[in-house]
Amino acid sequence: MAAVVAPIIVASFSSPNGLGRTPPMGWNPYNRMKSSGFKWVPDETIVLQQAAALASTGLRDLGYTYINLDAGWSLKERDPTTGRPVPDPKLYPNIANGGFARKLNAEGFEFGIYSDAGTLHCGGKGPGGLGHEATDANAFAEWGVSFLKYDNCFVPANESDPIPRYTAMSEALNRTGRPIFFAMCEWGYSDPARWGPAISNSWRTTADISDEWWAMVELADLTAIWFDAAGPGHWNDPDLLEVGNGGMTAGEYRSQFAIWSLMKAPLLISTDVTSMTSETLGILSNKEIIQINQDRLGVSGRLVEERPEDPAHLQVWAGPLSGGKVAVVLWNRGNTTATIMGRFVNMQLFGAASVRDCLAHKDLGIFHGQIERNVSGHDVEVMILTPSANQPRRTPDNEWAARWAGHGIRSPRSLAESSHGRRSAITGRPNTDRKNRERRALGL
Ligand SMILES: *[C@@H]1O[C@H](CO)[C@@H](O)[C@H](O)[C@H]1NC(C)=O
Ligand SMILES: *[C@@H]1O[C@H](CO)[C@@H](O)[C@H](O)[C@H]1NC(C)=O
Ligand SMILES: *[C@@H]1O[C@H](CO)[C@@H](O)[C@H](O)[C@H]1NC(C)=O
Ligand SMILES: *[C@@H]1O[C@H](CO)[C@@H](O)[C@H](O)[C@H]1NC(C)=O
């Protein structure tokens, strides 16, 4: 009797609260605030204008439905009677009465808030949740909150282990009875990809992004190594999108959007959507790339080929999609146009596949064994490959996902250099991002 081989189930849905079947999409003001030197201070009116613009531009209907706040919404002191955090009455008069969430819900959005697993919010203008988890979680639930970003500033020296701090909030959120997406912002210090899936819906894999090519590239590399940790209900988070903030070229922003989508990162827009250019809107509203991010298989893409030796700036990133398809990003991290070739064997494909160009929105025809495209410097080509019908059997989704487990380059060459040499392998610039992370960890 032939042995029956049980399919290995990978990337099955597991979530502490039933949320996050696909990566969250929405808006957060932080990168826009930072790009203004924190002179741009969102309040209720401004946030509702952003929501209205997300709706009128069609972004809401493409899936960008979480409207999240970052640090700055709260007074520093808790309410002396209830012990609860107090929304700044000048900026957010209707959070605590539930009116703000109701207004967002009525427009088809969900309301997200921010707190911190230390004694104060980052920036120092709000009370951290450490030791107040139940009080704060209950307040958030009552206010109609559906998403919590939980930061890592002002951590007392004797509380350096993040696991109990984040677990306490996860459990407090659970006890409210309200499903609240739990986005851990631990900056990747203690490898949260290893312990995050059990208690959260997403975990930051890195320090903060900045609106510069080299920083974005480094965050992609630092995140890609954790490809096997992501899955439906629990995602790697390399931080907010910078698309639209002006520090990168269109090709560089296309790169961020494509790689973030492929890695199944949260797609959180962080620019002023009331004044974005049509180029910005075009990048953020690419349906075919959003589909890669939101595909039901929920398996992260990863780096599968890189060349030449040094610097290895011509890269092939790929990941499986439902229905036996493959999403491919050819990423030219060099400065000038170059031909990038991706071999099907590195994409778990054999034989022929039809190729869809997700940027030009056109079919490129049938390719055999490999795909070769000319890619501009600091830019990407994004494609979906569908195996031709005459290929070996199509496998069910779970077996297809399982075939990708552990398959990919875990140590990009650039990373070895950037994490040990303290400089970006891409541009040679000093790694100030890491310095900022150290400053923030000290609460400076
Ligand atoms: C709380 O946790 C239990 C057990 O994991 C889970 O079944 C339930 O859905 C969670 N509830 C919320 C509101 O997160
Ligand atoms: C850290 O110190 C504070 C204040 O003394 C105390 O309340 C808390 O329990 C300590 N935490 C740990 C993990 O020992
Ligand atoms: C691209 O240009 C930068 C700045 O001139 C340089 O440091 C870097 O090595 C170049 N990258 C490649 C892959 O040639
Ligand atoms: C890339 O560009 C070169 C020079 O224009 C051209 O000869 C070649 O056919 C192009 N390759 C692809 C794959 O389009």
Image (cartoon, rainbow, N blue to C red):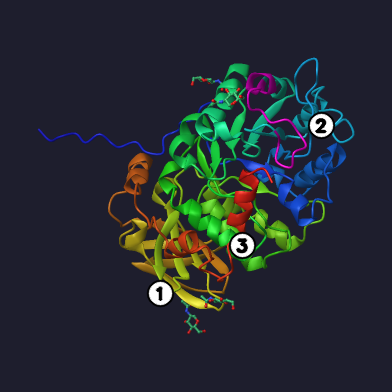
Q: What residue type is disc 2 on? A: Leu
Q: Which residue is mark 2?
A: 75
Disc with the residue nearer the chain's start (2 vs 3): 2
Disc with the residue nearer the chain's start (2 vs 1): 2
Name the residue: 54% across, 44% down. 294
Q: Nearer the viewer, mark 2 or mark 3?
A: 2
Q: Nearer the viewer, mark 2 or mark 1?
A: 2
Q: Which residue is mark 1?
A: 308
Q: Nearer the viewer, residue 126 or 4?
A: 126
The residues bearing labels 2 and 3 have C-alpha atoms spaced at a distance of 37 Å
Residue stretch rendered in magenta on the structure:
120-137
* Magenta portion: prevailing SS class: loop
Is residue 440 part of the magenta span, yes or no? no
Q: Position of residue 289 (x, y in %)?
A: 57, 54
Is residue 122 part of the magenta span, yes or no? yes
Q: Secondary structure at mark 2?
A: loop
In this rendering, position of residue 324 left or right of residue 239: left
Name the residue: 80% across, 24% down. 96
Q: Nearer the viewer, residue 214 or 146?
A: 214
Residue at the extreme right of the image, as rendered: 90
Q: Position of residue 190 (x, y in %)?
A: 49, 41
Q: What residue type is disc 3 on? A: Arg
* Quadrant containing ligand 3: bottom right
In this rendering, position of residue 389 left or right of residue 259: left
| Few, some or many residues within 10 Å of mark 1 (<14, 14–19, 20+) | few
The residues bearing labels 2 and 1 have C-alpha atoms spaced at a distance of 53 Å
